[in-house]
Image: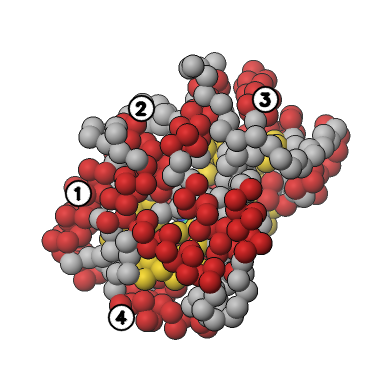
Amino acid sequence: MKTIIEPFRIKSVEPLHHTTAAEREAYLEAAGYNLFAIEAAHILIDLLTDSGTSAMSTEQWAAIMRGDESYAGSESFFRLKKVADELTGFRHMIPTHQGRAAERILFTVLAQPGQIVPSNTHFDTTRANIEFMGARAVDLPVPEAADTQARLDFKGNLDVAALEALIAAEGAQKIPLVMLTATNNSGGGQPVSMANIEAVRKVCSRHGIPLYLDACRFAENAWFIREREAGYRNWPPKQIAQKMFSLADGCTFSAKKDAFANIGGFLCTNDDRLAQQETNLLILTEGFPTYGGLAGRDLDAIAVGLEEVLDPDYLRYRVVSTGYLGRHIADRGVPIVEPPGGHAIYIDAGRMLPHIPRHQFPGQALAVELYRHAGIRSVEIGSLMFGAEARHELLRLAIPRRVYTQSHIDYVVEAILEVNQRKEQIRGLEIVEQPPFLRHFSARLRPL
Ligand code: F0G
């Protein structure tokens, strides 16, 4: 059989509710044309994020019931530790309430003002946490990533020559760590190859700089390696993931992505002294080291999710179903970041709406139009999110894991193609009000 199906069936459903065009217009106006400010009840299909929005499995719900809520030494912690240790191989696993809490602790301990943290591409919270410490977050994607239309296998890679040049220019002591975000979320959900991780590892080792993975979507990345990189075709995804982790000195992880959990994360390191400092900070803001800001039941849900996500049937379906959305709109003239990523499709709004200049936020204008037309929520990843640092004006359609069926996606395809037919009529936006950082979450805008 050639048809790839959802490798699960549905036991519990959440009803969806339609809204009228007039209602959506009113919600948009009240929200300041910022989709983060719209109530979820007023969204039909929510592609804002794949983070924390997964459907948990029966085994995860069963694990929730087994959760041990002891303050110290909870059995849930040891169940998670066993799974995480076997997967990552790192000496220390420090649970946190989500990925950015791990980032905050890591950079508080490792990053000094004036230092530089390079990455293939930092995610927005990672960048913000680095900058909050007075350090500089530098993106060094491979040059091929600049062409959204190039269909290459590993556009998430870090530019190794640029990293060497940066180290030569600034000195290794100015670089407390190098990060690799796998998959590269802000860079279009594109994977990082094993060869690239190995090459970055070599440079880091030569200069005594620790290498960290931002491992949010490690399983999707492992699947792309299996499909696209020579030598891995017969490897189980878990073994590929283990090799990825073995090349790093530590990782940050948001369990809200590739662990199917609704909350959670962790910070790993092989450095005993660092782990001690990190644990001290953890106790200050997150909690005791065996729960780190989570309930015992969350730790158990993550432990089960970390194993489920490496199922080849799931990963095949995941990558194929995301590609289905991408191909159906791209092959009918909507420019996307090629090739389709693992967790999301990114429309190149700058290319689709050339009549809207960057400072009028083409990605946001398209997000607003897609909600207005069909009740679909997506997110701008462009000048509204990153300001002058933005490389592209993208609109991300992130696919929650195991949540929407193919007919939901067919509805999304139809809506995008209809909006594309009258794209010349879409107008840009201007900012009316904005906070000092991470402005995309709460800025208010108005149509021009
Ligand atoms: N790193 C990456 C690559 C991410 O995509 C995210 C979150 C984080 C770190 C932070 O993790 O949310 O648990 O604190 N990304 C979500 C998204 C929010 O929509 O892409 P968190």
Q: Between tags 4 and 2, which lies in front?
A: 4
Earlier in the chain: of badge 2 and badge 3, it is 2
Q: Between tags 2 and 1, which lies in front?
A: 1
Nearer the observer, 230 or 296: 296
Say which element carries label 1: helix
From mark 2 to mark 3, how far is it between C-alphas? 29 Å
From mark 3 to mark 1, how far is it between C-alphas? 42 Å
From mark 4 to mark 2, how far is it between C-alphas? 44 Å
Which label belongs to residue 407?
Answer: 3
Amino acid type at image mark 4: Arg
Q: Between tags 2 and 3, which lies in front?
A: 3
Which label belongs to residue 175?
Answer: none
Who's the residue at 56% across and 33% down the image?
A: 7
Who's the residue at 77% across and 50% down the image?
A: 39
Earlier in the chain: of badge 4 and badge 3, it is 4
Where does the image place residue 423, in percent across and percent down from the top left?
A: 63, 24
Query: Is disc 3's CB within 8 Å of ligand 1?
Result: no
Residue annotated with mark 1:
199
Earlier in the chain: of badge 4 and badge 2, it is 2
Earlier in the chain: of badge 2 and badge 1, it is 2
- Left or right: 357 with respect to 123? right
Residue annotated with mark 2:
150
From mark 4 to mark 1, how far is it between C-alphas? 27 Å
Residue annotated with mark 4:
273
Nearer the observer, 183 or 138: 183
Nearer the observer, 436 or 411: 411
Q: Badge 1, how many Cα within 10 Å: few under 14, some, many 20+?
A: some
